[in-house]
Amino acid sequence: MLATVKQPYPQTGGVSWHWRAWRKRAQWRSFQQWVGQQWYQKNADGISKNTDAGHCDASFRNTAAGSRRELIMLGPSAGWTLPDDILDPFTHITCVDMDPLAPLFFRLVHKKSETTRHGQHAQTQPARKIAWLQQDFMTTLSDVLAQWPHATLLFANSLGQQGLLHDTPETTETLFSHLKTQLKGRCWFSYHDRLSLHFESPPAQNAINELLRRSMTLESNTTLSSEDLMQQLQIAQWAAELNAPRKPLHQARHTSQTRMHITDHLTGDILPPGSRRRYSLLPVTDKALHIVEAGWAV
């Protein structure tokens, strides 16, 4: 059964999330690489070309060596889906996250990046400072923006989780509307859940690979509604193929159905008009696939 729903979600974060992410860390490496590609916009030659965010270059790419380069990560948790090299250009990083366990796990997850900076590159790169604020960034964003007026902002797979934290979809949509007003004129990047697909039984890997292929070939410079996104990805057709009758090896009659429902994370118009949007797939559990959108605000 297919249904697009807009409703309150269970609570997010905590020990269960970190345990799940730790178990999935190897499977998520390709997704991490995709996030890095959207951040740097690497061309076919592997040269960094951040064409979507040219106005952000001064924040971290063309700044003189040794100067203060600031990054604010909003809702990064432990950075389970963040590639290490995103942190490299910055000397001052502020992470805003409500999860009290996030700093501990972040240090463990990104230990390699810290060792590299303080090791072989210690002569050429200034020491990195990471500060943590245990706050809800949605309610304290105005203070954060005022305190760091020139920092680059990174919403690290966090905006799509806001429905987990608020009572009604209307509350979430109101907060998003205020958020977009606050961010006008700022340099920011986000990758966030658009849709999540929930199954009664795990879909086959070849079906997941096909949906991943469809997601990664989709690109848009305009806002795609949830209905448009589902149509572009041919979700209904893909789900129908999951439910097609199958014959097991012993040739007995058998019909296998993988029932599915779809959750709308209400992030369809988070990125401003004209921003280039790209898509990928994150297998959060064996029975849940998240369609993720990424882009720079332009």
Image (cartoon, rainbow, N blue to C red):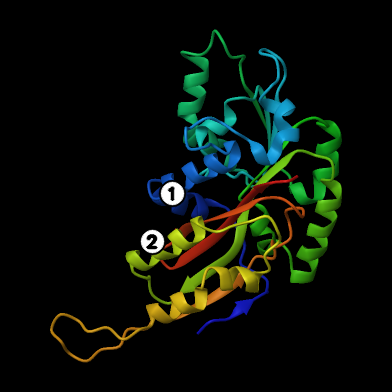
Label disc, if present, on residue 28 of the rendered structure: 1
Circles 2 and 1: CB atoms closer than 8 Å: no
Marks 2 and 1, how far apart at CA: 14 Å
Which is more toward the observer, 48 or 120? 48
Question: Residue tagged by mark 2?
Answer: 209
Residue lying at the far bottom of the rendered structure: 253
Above or below 217: residue 108: above
Q: Outermost residue toward the left?
A: 250
Question: Which residue type carries mark 2?
Answer: Asn
State the image coordinates of residue 261 (x, y, percent, origin top left): 53, 77
Residue drawn at x 37%, y 71% is 203
Q: Tell me which residue sits at (52%, 19%) in the image.
A: 117
The one of 133 and 292 positioned closer to us in this rendering: 292
**Lateral position of residue 57 relative to residue 248, left or right:** right
Q: Residues within 10 Å of mark 1 (few under 14, many from 20)?
A: many
Q: Secondary structure at mark 1?
A: loop
